Image (spheres, rainbow, N blue to C red):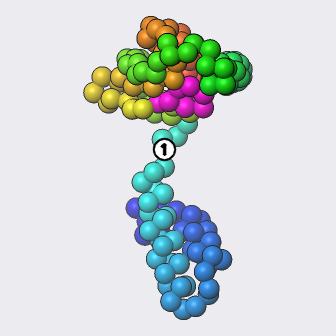
Amino acid sequence: MTMVPHPLVSVLIAVLWLILTSVTPGQIVLAVLVGLVAGAAFGKLTAERVRVRRPGLMLLLAGRVFIDIIRSNYQVAGLILTDARGRRRRSGFVRITLDLTNRNALAMLAIIITSTPGTAWIELDPDDNGLLLHVFDLKDDQDWSRIIKTRYEPLLMEIFR
């Protein structure tokens, strides 16, 4: 391991520090220290190398996500603006056991779920790979399990296998 694992990150952070503060000898020393610490921290956060096996499927996934986000925007806006279901709307949590284990695919699924209005990725239990999902308008737990397990998970498993 090198003394400065990510020199570009360290330099950029130090320069940014100096841009945001006054350039004095003390600030230069502090900028270098902050840059070195940030570079080391960045080294710990670096994800595993992404290996996309079926890039063509990414277009299909992007299309599905785009359609789902548009559809969900209309549904959530309708529920909020018109109170369409009145007091019968209920929020809730859904637990889904995932077969997906690739860290990059899981990160992509988290982005998809959280980007879709009305849903939020709460946690992933590493013991049983159980996803805890919060849903704004929960009608049926099995619907959400089916959506994740059939609409997103197989595509992500193919793309990132």
Total marks placed: 1
Vertical relation: 19 (above or below) 68? below
Q: Residue 98, percent across and down? A: 41, 19
Classify mark 1: residues with Cα within 10 Å, few (<14), some (14-19) or many (20+). Answer: few
Instruction: Give whichever of 32, 151 is nearer the camera.
Output: 151
Q: Residue at x 55, y 15 (%)?
A: 86
Q: Residue 97, percent across and down? A: 37, 17
Q: Is residue 46 visible?
A: yes
Residue sitting farthest toward the bottom: 25
Where is residue 61, by image quadrant? Answer: top right
Vertical relation: 10 (above or below) 154? below
Where is residue 65, by image quadrant? Answer: top right
Please give the residue where the numbered disc 1 appears in the rendered image: 47
Residue type marked 1: Ala
Range drawn in magenta: 112-121
Q: Residue 131, percent across and down? A: 40, 24
Instruction: Give whichever of 63, 45 is nearer the camera.
Output: 63
Image position of 123 (left or right of 75): left
Image position of 60 (left or right of 157): right
What is the secondary structure assignment of the residue under circle 1? loop
Q: Residue at x 48, y 73 (%)?
A: 34
Vertical relation: 86 (above or below) 30? above
Q: Residue at x 39, y 25 (%)?
A: 132
Q: Residue at x 52, y 40 (%)?
A: 49
Instruction: Give whichever of 35, 122 is nearer the camera.
Output: 122
Magenta includes 17? Answer: no
Image position of 125 (left or right of 119): left
Q: Is residue 51 visible?
A: no
Q: Residue 45, percent across and down? A: 45, 51
The image quadrant where one finds the N terminus is bottom left
